[in-house]
Amino acid sequence: MIGGAAAGKGGHRCGAAALAPSGQEDDAGARGRARSAPCRSAPGVKASTLERDGFVSRTVTPSVPVRVDYDLTPLGRDLMPVVRAVKTWAETHFDDVHAARARYDAEVVAA
């Protein structure tokens, strides 16, 4: 179960993307739960959208303050290998993307 969401070192780690598949540990040793750090949401992705699409389930616990927990559904767990592959690719090519942006920006400004 996820109590809130989390942000990992140098990137978006929020909601489903911050979870290890059920029964597996992620790189921080968490089992299907978020890390204890603030979350920066991914652009254009809302928890309600992930819930509507069937990737997460949401449980509200009445308390002060109200507690909201998210769990990956089987569909969400099935997507995790793809999410991890995209994350790995992005981390590997981070400098390449920034260099391409700098080249593009220099060409657009020069034009």
Image: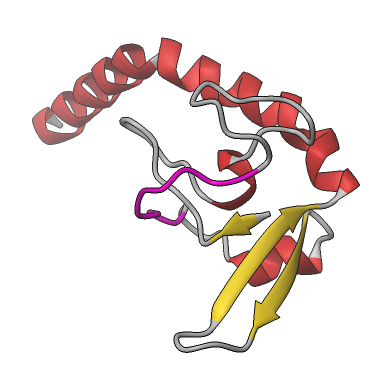
Residue at point 65%, 25% (across, down): 25
Residue at point 27%, 22% (across, down): 98
Q: Position of residue 6 (x, y in %)?
A: 45, 49
Asked if residue 42 lies left or right of residue 94, the reply is: right
Q: Residue furthest front?
A: 63
Residue 40 lies within the magenta run = yes
Q: Position of residue 109 (x, y in %)?
A: 12, 34
Q: Quadrant of residue 62?
A: bottom right
Residue 16 drawn above or below residue 45: above
Q: Nearer the viewer, residue 40 or 104?
A: 40
Asked if residue 32 lies left or right of residue 111, the reply is: right
Q: Identify the magenta region.
A: 33-41
Q: Quadrant of the N terminus?
A: bottom right
Q: Quadrant of residue 82?
A: top right
Q: Quadrant of the C terminus?
A: top left
Asked if residue 19 lies left or right of residue 44, the reply is: right
Residue at point 66%, 35% (across, down): 31
Residue 87 drawn above or below residue 66: above
Residue at point 35%, 54% (across, down): 38
Report the coloring of the rendering. Answer: secondary structure
Q: Residue furthest right?
A: 74
Q: Position of residue 15 (x, y in %)?
A: 58, 52
Residue 10 lies within the magenta run = no
Instruction: Give the overall secondary structure of the magenta segment.
Output: loop
Residue 82 drawn above or below residue 64: above
Q: Position of residue 87 (x, y in %)?
A: 53, 25
Q: Residue furthest left?
A: 110
